[in-house]
Image (cartoon, rainbow, N blue to C red):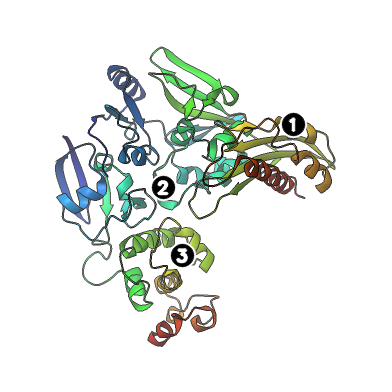
Amino acid sequence: MIPAPFAYARPTTVEEALQAIADCGEDVKVLAGGQSLIPVMRLRLAAPETVVDLGKVAGLRGVRDDGDAIVIGAMTTHSDVLADPLVAEHAPLIAEATGTVADRQVRHRGTFGGALVHADPAGDLPAVALALDAEFVVAGQSGRRTVPAGEFFVDYLTTAVGEGELLVEVRVPKYTGWSMRYEKFNRVAQAWSIVAVAAAVRREDGRIAEARVGLTNMGPTPLRARQVEEALAGAEATAEAVAAAAERAAEGTDPTSDLNAQADYRQHLAKVLTRRAVSTAAGL
Amino acid sequence: MTPITVRVDGASYTDDVEPRTLLVHYLREQLGKVGTVVGCDTSNCGACTVHLDGEAVKSCTVLAVQADGSEVTTIEGVAGGAGLHPVQKAFHEMHGLQCGYCTPGMIMASIDLLKDNPDPSDDEVREGIEGNLCRCTGYQNIVRAVRHAAAEMRGGANGVPSGSVSPAVVDTAAAPHVAVQS
Protein backbone atom coordinates (compact mmCIF):
# COMPACT_ATOMS: atom_id res chain seq x y z
CA MET A 1 0.00 0.00 0.00
CA ILE A 2 1.14 3.50 -0.73
CA PRO A 3 -0.48 6.70 0.51
CA ALA A 4 -3.09 8.52 -1.56
CA PRO A 5 -1.68 11.49 -3.47
CA PHE A 6 -1.13 14.66 -1.48
CA ALA A 7 0.40 18.09 -1.94
CA TYR A 8 3.69 18.47 -0.12
CA ALA A 9 5.19 21.48 1.65
CA ARG A 10 8.73 21.51 2.97
CA PRO A 11 9.18 24.65 5.09
CA THR A 12 12.50 25.55 6.68
CA THR A 13 11.34 27.76 9.57
CA VAL A 14 8.50 27.62 12.09
CA GLU A 15 7.02 30.74 10.50
CA GLU A 16 7.06 29.15 7.05
CA ALA A 17 5.51 26.01 8.51
CA LEU A 18 2.70 27.99 10.14
CA GLN A 19 2.12 29.84 6.88
CA ALA A 20 2.03 26.56 4.94
CA ILE A 21 -0.52 25.15 7.38
CA ALA A 22 -2.62 28.30 7.13
CA ASP A 23 -2.47 28.22 3.33
CA CYS A 24 -3.60 24.64 3.11
CA GLY A 25 -7.01 24.91 4.67
CA GLU A 26 -8.48 22.26 6.92
CA ASP A 27 -7.27 19.05 5.35
CA VAL A 28 -3.62 19.27 6.31
CA LYS A 29 -1.41 16.94 8.28
CA VAL A 30 1.89 17.87 9.87
CA LEU A 31 4.64 15.31 9.29
CA ALA A 32 7.23 14.97 12.06
CA GLY A 33 9.04 11.61 12.06
CA GLY A 34 6.18 9.92 10.27
CA GLN A 35 6.26 6.69 12.25
CA SER A 36 2.55 6.91 13.03
CA LEU A 37 1.36 9.17 10.23
CA ILE A 38 2.92 7.29 7.32
CA PRO A 39 1.50 3.88 8.34
CA VAL A 40 -1.91 5.48 8.81
CA MET A 41 -1.66 7.08 5.37
CA ARG A 42 -0.46 3.85 3.80
CA LEU A 43 -3.48 2.04 5.20
CA ARG A 44 -5.61 4.91 3.82
CA LEU A 45 -7.00 5.59 7.27
CA ALA A 46 -5.87 9.14 6.60
CA ALA A 47 -5.65 10.82 3.21
CA PRO A 48 -4.83 14.49 3.82
CA GLU A 49 -4.83 16.88 0.89
CA THR A 50 -1.60 18.42 2.08
CA VAL A 51 1.33 17.23 4.18
CA VAL A 52 3.57 19.82 5.80
CA ASP A 53 6.94 18.19 6.50
CA LEU A 54 8.83 19.62 9.49
CA GLY A 55 11.97 17.62 8.68
CA LYS A 56 13.91 20.62 7.43
CA VAL A 57 12.64 23.15 9.96
CA ALA A 58 15.58 24.47 11.93
CA GLY A 59 15.56 24.83 15.67
CA LEU A 60 13.07 22.14 16.62
CA ARG A 61 15.62 19.46 17.49
CA GLY A 62 17.64 18.97 20.60
CA VAL A 63 17.40 19.32 24.37
CA ARG A 64 18.52 22.41 26.27
CA ASP A 65 18.94 23.43 29.88
CA ASP A 66 16.60 26.23 30.92
CA GLY A 67 17.26 26.77 34.61
CA ASP A 68 14.66 24.85 36.57
CA ALA A 69 13.51 22.89 33.52
CA ILE A 70 14.84 21.08 30.50
CA VAL A 71 13.34 21.92 27.13
CA ILE A 72 12.94 19.20 24.54
CA GLY A 73 12.44 20.30 20.94
CA ALA A 74 9.39 18.76 19.34
CA MET A 75 11.40 17.23 16.48
CA THR A 76 13.99 15.58 18.73
CA THR A 77 14.02 11.92 17.76
CA HIS A 78 13.41 9.20 20.31
CA SER A 79 16.97 7.95 19.89
CA ASP A 80 18.35 11.44 20.54
CA VAL A 81 16.18 11.72 23.65
CA LEU A 82 17.53 8.34 24.80
CA ALA A 83 21.12 9.50 24.38
CA ASP A 84 20.65 12.92 25.94
CA PRO A 85 22.50 13.58 29.21
CA LEU A 86 20.05 16.28 30.39
CA VAL A 87 17.12 13.89 30.03
CA ALA A 88 19.07 11.16 31.82
CA GLU A 89 19.89 13.48 34.70
CA HIS A 90 16.67 15.42 35.20
CA ALA A 91 13.88 13.29 33.75
CA PRO A 92 15.07 9.67 33.51
CA LEU A 93 11.45 8.53 33.34
CA ILE A 94 11.30 9.98 29.82
CA ALA A 95 14.37 8.04 28.75
CA GLU A 96 13.09 4.83 30.29
CA ALA A 97 9.70 5.09 28.59
CA THR A 98 11.25 6.17 25.29
CA GLY A 99 13.43 3.07 25.34
CA THR A 100 10.28 0.95 25.26
CA VAL A 101 8.83 2.70 22.22
CA ALA A 102 8.68 0.36 19.21
CA ASP A 103 12.16 -0.61 17.96
CA ARG A 104 15.49 0.97 17.05
CA GLN A 105 14.47 1.81 13.50
CA VAL A 106 11.29 3.55 14.62
CA ARG A 107 13.14 5.37 17.42
CA HIS A 108 15.62 6.74 14.87
CA ARG A 109 12.79 8.48 13.00
CA GLY A 110 9.96 8.97 15.48
CA THR A 111 9.97 12.20 17.45
CA PHE A 112 9.17 13.23 21.01
CA GLY A 113 6.77 15.95 19.92
CA GLY A 114 5.17 13.85 17.22
CA ALA A 115 4.35 11.08 19.66
CA LEU A 116 2.81 13.57 22.10
CA VAL A 117 0.69 15.36 19.50
CA HIS A 118 -0.44 12.04 18.03
CA ALA A 119 -1.77 11.32 21.54
CA ASP A 120 -2.38 7.65 21.02
CA PRO A 121 -3.84 6.30 24.29
CA ALA A 122 -1.42 3.35 24.02
CA GLY A 123 1.55 5.62 23.34
CA ASP A 124 4.12 5.72 26.13
CA LEU A 125 5.10 9.36 26.30
CA PRO A 126 1.78 11.12 27.05
CA ALA A 127 1.38 9.53 30.50
CA VAL A 128 5.00 10.34 31.26
CA ALA A 129 4.55 13.99 30.26
CA LEU A 130 1.40 14.12 32.37
CA ALA A 131 3.07 12.54 35.41
CA LEU A 132 5.98 14.98 35.17
CA ASP A 133 3.73 18.05 34.76
CA ALA A 134 5.36 18.99 31.47
CA GLU A 135 4.39 22.21 29.70
CA PHE A 136 3.70 22.30 25.98
CA VAL A 137 4.78 25.33 23.96
CA VAL A 138 2.44 25.71 21.01
CA ALA A 139 3.12 28.19 18.21
CA GLY A 140 0.47 29.85 16.09
CA GLN A 141 0.50 32.77 13.70
CA SER A 142 -0.52 35.09 16.53
CA GLY A 143 2.29 33.95 18.81
CA ARG A 144 3.16 31.24 21.28
CA ARG A 145 1.20 29.89 24.22
CA THR A 146 2.00 27.39 26.92
CA VAL A 147 -0.39 24.56 27.74
CA PRO A 148 0.02 22.53 30.95
CA ALA A 149 0.04 18.75 30.50
CA GLY A 150 -3.24 18.47 32.40
CA GLU A 151 -4.97 20.45 29.65
CA PHE A 152 -3.02 19.16 26.67
CA PHE A 153 -4.59 15.75 26.15
CA VAL A 154 -8.19 16.46 25.26
CA ASP A 155 -9.56 13.20 23.88
CA TYR A 156 -8.69 10.15 21.79
CA LEU A 157 -5.92 11.23 19.38
CA THR A 158 -6.80 14.84 20.19
CA THR A 159 -4.73 17.50 21.90
CA ALA A 160 -5.06 21.18 22.68
CA VAL A 161 -2.99 22.00 19.59
CA GLY A 162 -5.53 23.92 17.53
CA GLU A 163 -6.00 24.31 13.82
CA GLY A 164 -3.13 26.26 12.37
CA GLU A 165 -0.90 25.60 15.37
CA LEU A 166 2.28 23.58 15.94
CA LEU A 167 3.86 22.05 19.02
CA VAL A 168 7.39 23.45 19.05
CA GLU A 169 8.86 22.33 22.38
CA VAL A 170 8.10 20.73 25.71
CA ARG A 171 9.35 22.04 29.06
CA VAL A 172 9.92 19.41 31.70
CA PRO A 173 10.65 20.55 35.27
CA LYS A 174 13.90 19.20 36.70
CA TYR A 175 13.19 16.46 39.18
CA THR A 176 16.07 16.66 41.61
CA GLY A 177 16.00 14.04 44.33
CA TRP A 178 13.25 12.01 42.68
CA SER A 179 13.37 8.39 41.53
CA MET A 180 11.32 7.14 38.61
CA ARG A 181 10.08 4.01 36.95
CA TYR A 182 8.07 3.12 33.84
CA GLU A 183 6.35 -0.26 33.98
CA LYS A 184 4.95 -1.41 30.65
CA PHE A 185 2.88 -4.48 29.93
CA ASN A 186 2.72 -5.72 26.37
CA ARG A 187 2.70 -9.12 24.79
CA VAL A 188 5.49 -9.09 22.22
CA ALA A 189 8.51 -7.02 21.30
CA GLN A 190 7.76 -3.64 19.67
CA ALA A 191 4.05 -3.89 20.60
CA TRP A 192 2.01 -1.06 22.03
CA SER A 193 1.32 -0.87 25.74
CA ILE A 194 -1.73 -2.81 26.87
CA VAL A 195 -1.35 -0.80 30.06
CA ALA A 196 1.66 1.04 31.40
CA VAL A 197 2.37 3.12 34.50
CA ALA A 198 4.77 6.02 34.91
CA ALA A 199 5.78 6.74 38.49
CA ALA A 200 7.98 9.37 40.09
CA VAL A 201 8.63 9.31 43.82
CA ARG A 202 10.46 11.64 46.22
CA ARG A 203 11.46 10.04 49.48
CA GLU A 204 12.23 11.86 52.69
CA ASP A 205 13.68 9.83 55.51
CA GLY A 206 11.55 6.69 55.71
CA ARG A 207 8.54 8.22 54.02
CA ILE A 208 7.26 8.95 50.55
CA ALA A 209 7.04 12.72 50.52
CA GLU A 210 5.47 13.03 47.09
CA ALA A 211 4.49 10.72 44.28
CA ARG A 212 3.26 11.24 40.74
CA VAL A 213 1.64 8.47 38.79
CA GLY A 214 0.57 8.54 35.14
CA LEU A 215 -1.45 5.81 33.45
CA THR A 216 -1.09 4.74 29.82
CA ASN A 217 -4.04 3.27 27.92
CA MET A 218 -6.54 3.44 30.77
CA GLY A 219 -8.92 5.67 28.82
CA PRO A 220 -9.02 7.84 25.71
CA THR A 221 -6.36 10.12 27.21
CA PRO A 222 -3.49 9.51 29.62
CA LEU A 223 -4.57 9.84 33.24
CA ARG A 224 -3.08 10.83 36.57
CA ALA A 225 -3.80 8.33 39.33
CA ARG A 226 -4.62 11.08 41.83
CA GLN A 227 -6.04 8.76 44.47
CA VAL A 228 -2.80 6.78 44.48
CA GLU A 229 -0.76 9.96 44.71
CA GLU A 230 -2.81 11.19 47.66
CA ALA A 231 -2.57 7.85 49.43
CA LEU A 232 1.19 7.82 48.97
CA ALA A 233 1.85 11.40 50.10
CA GLY A 234 3.40 11.12 53.54
CA ALA A 235 2.98 7.36 53.67
CA GLU A 236 5.66 5.13 55.08
CA ALA A 237 7.94 3.79 52.37
CA THR A 238 6.97 0.18 52.86
CA ALA A 239 5.80 -2.49 50.47
CA GLU A 240 2.49 -2.70 52.36
CA ALA A 241 1.77 1.02 52.09
CA VAL A 242 2.62 1.08 48.40
CA ALA A 243 0.45 -1.98 47.75
CA ALA A 244 -2.48 -0.40 49.57
CA ALA A 245 -2.14 2.84 47.60
CA ALA A 246 -1.77 0.98 44.31
CA GLU A 247 -5.12 -0.72 44.89
CA ARG A 248 -6.68 2.65 44.05
CA ALA A 249 -4.98 2.97 40.64
CA ALA A 250 -8.05 2.02 38.61
CA GLU A 251 -10.46 4.36 40.40
CA GLY A 252 -12.21 6.65 37.98
CA THR A 253 -10.73 4.97 34.91
CA ASP A 254 -12.73 3.84 31.91
CA PRO A 255 -10.39 1.73 29.79
CA THR A 256 -11.40 0.20 26.51
CA SER A 257 -11.94 -3.49 25.80
CA ASP A 258 -10.20 -4.79 22.70
CA LEU A 259 -8.40 -7.80 21.29
CA ASN A 260 -5.55 -7.39 23.74
CA ALA A 261 -7.48 -7.02 26.97
CA GLN A 262 -10.90 -6.52 28.50
CA ALA A 263 -11.51 -3.38 30.52
CA ASP A 264 -11.53 -5.18 33.86
CA TYR A 265 -8.22 -6.85 33.03
CA ARG A 266 -6.75 -3.45 32.22
CA GLN A 267 -7.95 -2.19 35.60
CA HIS A 268 -6.27 -5.15 37.24
CA LEU A 269 -3.06 -4.42 35.33
CA ALA A 270 -3.15 -0.77 36.37
CA LYS A 271 -3.06 -1.77 40.04
CA VAL A 272 -0.31 -4.35 39.61
CA LEU A 273 1.86 -2.12 37.45
CA THR A 274 1.35 0.86 39.75
CA ARG A 275 2.53 -1.23 42.69
CA ARG A 276 5.59 -2.36 40.74
CA ALA A 277 6.42 1.07 39.37
CA VAL A 278 6.05 2.90 42.68
CA SER A 279 7.89 0.16 44.59
CA THR A 280 10.83 0.30 42.21
CA ALA A 281 10.89 4.08 42.15
CA ALA A 282 10.79 4.14 45.95
CA GLY A 283 13.65 1.69 46.13
CA LEU A 284 11.59 -1.03 47.78
CA MET B 1 6.51 15.99 -8.38
CA THR B 2 9.20 17.06 -5.96
CA PRO B 3 12.92 17.13 -6.78
CA ILE B 4 15.22 15.20 -4.47
CA THR B 5 18.94 14.61 -4.36
CA VAL B 6 20.04 11.51 -2.53
CA ARG B 7 23.32 9.67 -2.23
CA VAL B 8 22.71 5.94 -2.33
CA ASP B 9 25.47 3.37 -1.85
CA GLY B 10 28.07 5.95 -2.78
CA ALA B 11 26.41 7.34 -5.92
CA SER B 12 24.45 10.58 -6.15
CA TYR B 13 21.01 10.68 -7.71
CA THR B 14 18.77 13.61 -8.53
CA ASP B 15 15.19 12.67 -9.35
CA ASP B 16 11.66 13.97 -9.40
CA VAL B 17 9.40 11.87 -7.21
CA GLU B 18 5.79 11.94 -6.21
CA PRO B 19 5.66 13.04 -2.57
CA ARG B 20 3.77 9.88 -1.66
CA THR B 21 6.57 7.65 -2.96
CA LEU B 22 7.97 5.52 -0.16
CA LEU B 23 11.73 5.40 0.11
CA VAL B 24 11.76 1.64 -0.40
CA HIS B 25 9.86 1.97 -3.68
CA TYR B 26 12.17 4.74 -4.84
CA LEU B 27 15.18 2.55 -4.07
CA ARG B 28 13.76 -0.54 -5.77
CA GLU B 29 11.81 0.84 -8.69
CA GLN B 30 13.64 4.01 -9.60
CA LEU B 31 17.20 3.05 -8.69
CA GLY B 32 16.96 -0.72 -9.14
CA LYS B 33 18.23 -1.42 -5.62
CA VAL B 34 16.15 -4.56 -5.33
CA GLY B 35 18.34 -6.01 -2.59
CA THR B 36 16.11 -4.09 -0.19
CA VAL B 37 12.79 -5.91 0.03
CA VAL B 38 9.27 -5.07 1.15
CA GLY B 39 8.03 -7.54 3.70
CA CYS B 40 4.88 -6.18 5.28
CA ASP B 41 2.34 -3.43 4.98
CA THR B 42 2.43 -2.35 8.58
CA SER B 43 5.95 -1.16 9.42
CA ASN B 44 6.42 -4.24 11.56
CA CYS B 45 8.79 -6.62 9.87
CA GLY B 46 11.93 -4.59 9.23
CA ALA B 47 12.79 -6.40 5.99
CA CYS B 48 13.12 -3.02 4.26
CA THR B 49 15.67 -1.66 6.76
CA VAL B 50 18.32 0.62 5.26
CA HIS B 51 20.65 3.17 6.80
CA LEU B 52 19.61 6.81 6.43
CA ASP B 53 22.48 9.10 7.37
CA GLY B 54 24.02 6.19 9.23
CA GLU B 55 20.96 5.13 11.22
CA ALA B 56 18.78 2.10 10.57
CA VAL B 57 15.27 3.02 9.42
CA LYS B 58 12.36 1.15 7.91
CA SER B 59 12.35 2.43 4.36
CA CYS B 60 8.66 1.57 3.95
CA THR B 61 7.92 4.19 6.61
CA VAL B 62 10.01 6.99 5.19
CA LEU B 63 8.91 9.08 2.22
CA ALA B 64 11.50 9.44 -0.51
CA VAL B 65 11.16 13.21 -0.18
CA GLN B 66 12.21 12.93 3.46
CA ALA B 67 15.52 11.46 2.32
CA ASP B 68 16.32 14.56 0.25
CA GLY B 69 19.85 15.67 0.98
CA SER B 70 20.63 12.47 2.85
CA GLU B 71 22.90 9.49 2.43
CA VAL B 72 21.32 6.06 2.14
CA THR B 73 23.13 2.75 2.45
CA THR B 74 21.34 -0.41 1.34
CA ILE B 75 22.35 -4.02 1.66
CA GLU B 76 23.84 -3.66 -1.82
CA GLY B 77 26.30 -1.02 -0.70
CA VAL B 78 27.05 -2.13 2.80
CA ALA B 79 30.25 -4.01 1.92
CA GLY B 80 31.59 -0.89 0.24
CA GLY B 81 32.86 -2.72 -2.83
CA ALA B 82 33.83 -6.29 -3.52
CA GLY B 83 33.36 -9.05 -0.98
CA LEU B 84 31.07 -9.17 2.00
CA HIS B 85 30.61 -7.04 5.08
CA PRO B 86 31.60 -8.96 8.24
CA VAL B 87 27.94 -9.20 9.22
CA GLN B 88 26.99 -10.58 5.80
CA LYS B 89 29.84 -13.06 6.10
CA ALA B 90 28.70 -14.10 9.58
CA PHE B 91 25.12 -14.69 8.42
CA HIS B 92 26.55 -16.90 5.69
CA GLU B 93 28.89 -18.81 7.96
CA MET B 94 26.46 -19.22 10.85
CA HIS B 95 23.53 -20.00 8.56
CA GLY B 96 21.64 -17.00 9.90
CA LEU B 97 18.87 -17.46 7.39
CA GLN B 98 16.39 -19.98 6.12
CA CYS B 99 14.26 -18.53 3.32
CA GLY B 100 16.41 -15.39 3.33
CA TYR B 101 13.66 -12.84 2.90
CA CYS B 102 14.30 -11.05 6.20
CA THR B 103 18.08 -11.20 5.77
CA PRO B 104 18.79 -7.81 4.15
CA GLY B 105 16.88 -6.08 6.93
CA MET B 106 18.36 -8.29 9.63
CA ILE B 107 21.86 -7.48 8.45
CA MET B 108 21.22 -3.74 8.22
CA ALA B 109 19.62 -3.70 11.67
CA SER B 110 22.46 -5.77 13.12
CA ILE B 111 25.14 -3.46 11.73
CA ASP B 112 23.27 -0.56 13.32
CA LEU B 113 23.14 -2.39 16.65
CA LEU B 114 26.84 -3.28 16.59
CA LYS B 115 27.74 0.33 15.97
CA ASP B 116 26.23 1.20 19.38
CA ASN B 117 27.04 -2.06 21.13
CA PRO B 118 30.10 -3.83 19.73
CA ASP B 119 29.80 -6.79 22.12
CA PRO B 120 26.12 -7.57 22.70
CA SER B 121 24.90 -10.50 24.76
CA ASP B 122 22.30 -12.86 23.30
CA ASP B 123 19.57 -10.87 25.04
CA GLU B 124 20.93 -7.58 23.77
CA VAL B 125 20.97 -8.93 20.22
CA ARG B 126 17.38 -10.07 20.55
CA GLU B 127 16.34 -6.73 21.97
CA GLY B 128 18.43 -4.82 19.46
CA ILE B 129 16.84 -6.42 16.43
CA GLU B 130 13.33 -6.56 17.88
CA GLY B 131 12.14 -4.52 14.91
CA ASN B 132 12.93 -7.34 12.51
CA LEU B 133 10.84 -10.45 12.10
CA CYS B 134 11.96 -13.82 10.72
CA ARG B 135 8.90 -15.70 9.60
CA CYS B 136 10.95 -18.91 9.45
CA THR B 137 11.64 -18.27 13.15
CA GLY B 138 15.33 -18.82 12.52
CA TYR B 139 16.33 -16.55 15.34
CA GLN B 140 18.85 -18.85 17.05
CA ASN B 141 21.27 -18.72 14.18
CA ILE B 142 20.61 -15.06 13.53
CA VAL B 143 21.63 -14.25 17.10
CA ARG B 144 24.68 -16.45 16.72
CA ALA B 145 25.58 -14.75 13.44
CA VAL B 146 25.35 -11.29 14.98
CA ARG B 147 27.56 -12.29 17.89
CA HIS B 148 30.00 -14.00 15.55
CA ALA B 149 30.18 -10.85 13.46
CA ALA B 150 30.64 -8.75 16.59
CA ALA B 151 33.62 -10.84 17.59
CA GLU B 152 35.09 -10.65 14.09
CA MET B 153 34.67 -6.90 14.00
CA ARG B 154 36.29 -6.51 17.41
CA GLY B 155 39.14 -8.71 16.22
CA GLY B 156 38.25 -11.25 18.87
CA ALA B 157 39.77 -14.70 19.21
CA ASN B 158 38.63 -16.93 16.38
CA GLY B 159 35.28 -15.28 16.17
CA VAL B 160 34.04 -16.87 19.35
CA PRO B 161 31.65 -14.54 21.16
CA SER B 162 32.87 -13.66 24.60
CA GLY B 163 31.07 -15.29 27.46
CA SER B 164 29.10 -17.62 25.24
CA VAL B 165 28.84 -21.35 25.59
CA SER B 166 29.33 -23.87 22.86
CA PRO B 167 26.40 -23.67 20.42
CA ALA B 168 25.55 -27.33 20.72
CA VAL B 169 24.99 -27.03 24.45
CA VAL B 170 22.28 -24.42 24.30
CA ASP B 171 20.72 -24.73 20.93
CA THR B 172 17.87 -26.51 19.27
CA ALA B 173 18.08 -29.45 16.94
CA ALA B 174 19.14 -27.16 14.12
CA ALA B 175 22.35 -26.28 15.87
CA PRO B 176 24.70 -29.21 15.20
CA HIS B 177 24.95 -28.66 11.50
CA VAL B 178 26.01 -25.08 12.14
CA ALA B 179 28.52 -26.17 14.74
CA VAL B 180 30.07 -28.48 12.18
CA GLN B 181 30.79 -25.55 9.91
CA SER B 182 32.99 -23.72 12.39
Q: How many marks?
A: 3
Residue A43 coordinates in the image, percent (x, y): 33, 40
Residue B76 location (% of width, % of height): 23, 62
Tell me where residue A7 appears, x and y as whole percent: 23, 28
Give me the disc on residue A227: 1
For marks 1 and 2, give the CA distance.
35 Å
- Residue B69 seen in this snapshot: no
Circle 3 sits in a helix, a strand or a loop, which is it?
A: loop
Q: Is residue B137 left or right of residue A99?
A: left
* Badge 1 element: helix
Q: Is residue B116 above or below residue B143?
A: above
Mark 1 vs mark 2: tell me if same chain. Answer: yes
| Residue, disc 2 | A106
Residue occupying image coordinates x 56% and y 50%: A186
Which residue corresponds to mark 3? B118
Badge 1 or badge 2: first in the primary sequence: 2
Q: Quadrant of the C terminus of chain B?
A: bottom left
